[in-house]
Structures are given as structure tokens and as C-alpha cells.
């Protein structure tokens, strides 16, 4: 497992109104043409139609299927602390990702956290291990409030990788059973990147997901982002939204 969390890397949006470029793979070009045909002269298409198109594309040969990604461009200034967007959403049908949880808990709760489903659990010894090795082989970290005051020694390591537990995202609390259950059920954290964009995994193209399940996940993700709109933002909040599968061109839906 790499040193990443469930957040996604930004994609480069390629206009679907232009001709497929020869320096792209044949599969990419074929997918782009299919998207162009679905859009016609429209600048955007509905989420429902976009998901159907994504399911029909040629997909990379990933064992568990290509991920469907929602990319939102927000009308915020990411350098202003009162305009940062951060939150979480419990996707009704799960994200399709196997999430490795690290639990920073009091010593008496280490075994309990593991029993509840945390792949990694520990107290001071876990903090010391991460401090010395800088290895974070987990996707999300949770912590009991008492442990938060002990995390500053590895805050740089966790923070730069988007792994720092945060009360606003629901990853800090004494109710570790509820926190772990929500994450395993499909809870996904999100926060804007340096360019003011958000990237959320909404499921995979495999036998576990139908188009309707993906549509429900996407709508739940958009609703969650709307709910954490910074109060200072009075103008249009979500400038645009694109959907894409892993390695595919994007489709504009907002």
C-alpha cells in the first residue's frame, strides 16, 4: 500500500469539443470520440447519461475495475483559511476501495480498535514508529482526543500526505467503533487542493456497482460538498464538475 489516502490526483481536463490527438493511445482516442458523440453540441450532459457513457468506454485491465472519479472546480481562494473546503461523505453504496485504517488510541483500546477493523492500531509506540521510519502504509487515520496532543511530532508527516485526523472530518473521537464502522461502510474524506479543486472516488466499474449505484454516490458526494460551502462565499460555489474513469477523458456534467 502506498503512502496515499483516498484523495485523488488532479486530472488534466481535455476538451471533448476538440479532435482526438494522435499522441494519445488508441483506446483513449476511441473513448474521446465516444464521449464527443454522446455530448453532441452540448457543453454538458446529465450525470445519468455521463455515467452510462463511462460504463460503455474501453477500460484499463485493472483487477477490480476502473475507478469513477468526480472532479469539482470550486470558486474559492485556497490561500484563505476561511475559504477552505473540507468534509466527508458516507457514499450510500461504498467507494469500492479497500481502506486501510490506522487508529491512534489509548493503550487499553489498541486490541479493540484492531478487532473493530483497524488494520493498524497503537499508542505512543505507533507514533514513535512513524516518526522514525516516516512510513504511512494506511489510507486514513483516526484518533481519540487524548492522542491528538501527542501527534504534533508526526504532524508534518501525516499532514503533507493528507492523513492527519481532524474533528471536522469525523476522524477524531472516543466513539472509535462508530468511526471505524462509518469508514468501512464507505465514508470518504475530501478537501480542496492547492488549486481549489476537489477529487472524490465514487465507485468502480465492476460487478459490485450498477450505473444507478454510481449515480447515487455521485449525488451524495455533490450534496456533501454543497453542505460545507464556506459562509464567506456568496458567489457561485461549484464552477464545474467533471466525471472520468481511471485513464479516460473527462465528461462535463456541471
Image: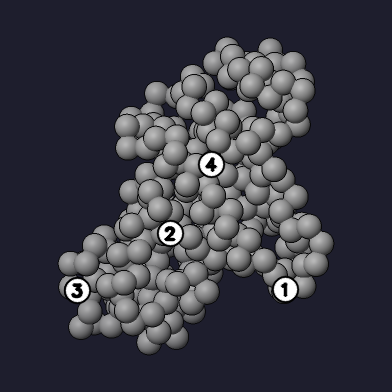
Residue depicted at x 33% and y 82%: 174
Q: Tell me the CA gap for discs 4 and 3.
A: 34 Å
Disc 2 marks which residue?
A: 90
Q: Which of the two discs, 3 and 2, labels the residue nearer the N terminus?
A: 2
Rendered view: 47 above or below 143: above
* For residue 219, side relative to residue 43 (left or right): left
Q: Which of the two discs, 4 and 3, labels the residue nearer the N terminus?
A: 4
List x then y, in percent, for residue 248.
57, 28
Q: Tell me the CA gap for discs 1 and 4.
A: 27 Å
List x then y, in percent, for residue 29.
62, 16
Secondary structure at numbered mark 1: loop
* For residue 173, side relative to residue 125 (left or right): right
Number of disc labels: 4
Disc 4 marks which residue?
A: 69
Secondary structure at numbered mark 2: strand
| Mark whose residue sits in front, 1 or 3 | 1
Residue depicted at x 68% and y 36%: 252
Q: Which of the two discs, 1 and 2, labels the residue nearer the N terminus?
A: 2
Disc 1 marks which residue?
A: 231
Secondary structure at numbered mark 4: strand
Q: Which mark is residue 112?
A: 3
Q: Quadrant of residue 60?
A: top left
Mark 3 nearby-residue class (10 Å; few <14, some 14–19, many ≥20): some
Amino acid at each position: 500500500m502506498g503512502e496515499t489516502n483516498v484523495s485523488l490526483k488532479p486530472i488534466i481536463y481535455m476538451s471533448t469539443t476538440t479532435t482526438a490527438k494522435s499522441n494519445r493511445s488508441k483506446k483513449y482516442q476511441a473513448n474521446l470520440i465516444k464521449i464527443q458523440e454522446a455530448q453532441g453540441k452540448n457543453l454538458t450532459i446529465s450525470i445519468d447519461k455521463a455515467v452510462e457513457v463511462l460504463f460503455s468506454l474501453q477500460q484499463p485491465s485493472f483487477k477490480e475495475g476502473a475507478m469513477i472519479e468526480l472532479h469539482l472546480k470550486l470558486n474559492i481562494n485556497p490561500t484563505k483559511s476561511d475559504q477552505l473546503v473540507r468534509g466527508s461523505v458516507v457514499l450510500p453504496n461504498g467507494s469500492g476501495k479497500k481502506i486501510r485504517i490506522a487508529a491512534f488510541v489509548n493503550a487499553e483500546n489498541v486490541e479493540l480498535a484492531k478487532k473493530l477493523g483497524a488494520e493498524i492500531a497503537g499508542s505512543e509506540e505507533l507514533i514513535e514508529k512513524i516518526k522514525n521510519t516516516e512510513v504511512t502504509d494506511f489510507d486514513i487515520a483516526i484518533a481519540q482526543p487524548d492522542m491528538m496532543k501527542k501527534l504534533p511530532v508526526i504532524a508534518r508527516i501525516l499532514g503533507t500526505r493528507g492523513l492527519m485526523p481532524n474533528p471536522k472530518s469525523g476522524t477524531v473521537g472516543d466513539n472509535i467503533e462508530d468511526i471505524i464502522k462509518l469508514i468501512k461502510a464507505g465514508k470518504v474524506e475530501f478537501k480542496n487542493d492547492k488549486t481549489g479543486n476537489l477529487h472524490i472516488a465514487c465507485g468502480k466499474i465492476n460487478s459490485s456497482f450498477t450505473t444507478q449505484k454510481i449515480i447515487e454516490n455521485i449525488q451524495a458526494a455533490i450534496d456533501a460538498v454543497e453542505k460545507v460551502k464556506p459562509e464567506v462565499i456568496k458567489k457561485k460555489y461549484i464552477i464545474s464538475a467533471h466525471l472520468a474513469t481511471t485513464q479516460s477523458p473527462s465528461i462535463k456534467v456541471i
